[in-house]
Image (cartoon, grey):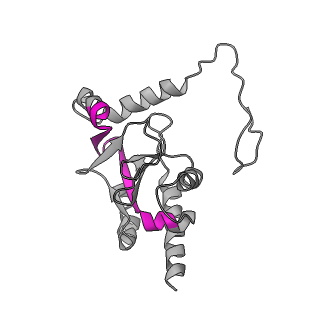
Amino acid sequence: MKPTAQLGTAALRPIEPEPGTLVHSSADRRLAAEHWLLSSLAEPGRGRQEWNTQGVVMLPLGTLFSAIRLPGRLVLAVTGAHSLPSREIDATLNDALGGGPVICDPRHQRYYVLVPASVPTSWRAAVDDWRVMDVDALGRGTVLGVPRLTRQEPHALASYWSVPMESMGELCTPLTVARFIGAGRHLMAEEQQ
């Protein structure tokens, strides 16, 4: 089926499933994404228990996925927002990063963009260049506090999904993230002039 809207517009017309088409509910996709995330642990059941009791689980990076850590000031520069966390920032990140998953850590004023596991090594030159802006690519040997997939509302201190993971294995594309960081670098340089 062809899209009914131009690239970059807000929405497409709903798709009517053909007879015999299997449709997965958002709850099914969320459960599959939870299983996928927890499969990075030796004991996925322990991870699920931590999500239930603490709302966050520490997941190892570099096997299923890695993360690019963005400082809040870079995100504020690109989004034009005045403070974080906010729904305005979340919506802008969703649009700018193509709906790929992003975790907000408001306590430390950081965002974690989930990317393919290979990014810290395959994008090494870019990552080295980004460090002057306090951007880093986190991979093997690092853990990330990942909130429950249902935690999607901004909170003053608790981490939440700024852009939720909609399906298992759905990650941000490195080039899209690099462009976002490049825009942030440009805008932050303009602010300093």
Q: Who's the residue at 49% across and 83% down the image? A: 192
| Vertical position of residue 52 compared to residue 156: above or below | above
| Vertical position of residue 177 compared to residue 103: above or below | below
Residue 70 percent coordinates (x, y): 41, 61
Q: Who's the residue at 49% across and 24% down the image? A: 28
Report the side of 49 relative to 131 (left or right).
left
Q: Residue furthest top?
A: 20
Magenta stretch containing residue 61, yes or no? yes
Report the side of 16 relative to 59 (left or right).
right
Q: Who's the residue at 30% across and 29% down the image? A: 48
In-front residue for pair 175/165: 165
In-front residue for pair 14/57: 57
Residue 35 percent coordinates (x, y): 37, 29
The residue segment tinted magenta is 50-76
| Vertical position of residue 12 compared to residue 97: above or below | above
| Vertical position of residue 19 compared to residue 66: above or below | above
Residue 97 seen in render: yes
Magenta stretch containing residue 82, yes or no? no
Residue 62 seen in render: no
Residue 1 percent coordinates (x, y): 73, 31
Q: Which residue lies furthest to the bottom in this view?
A: 193
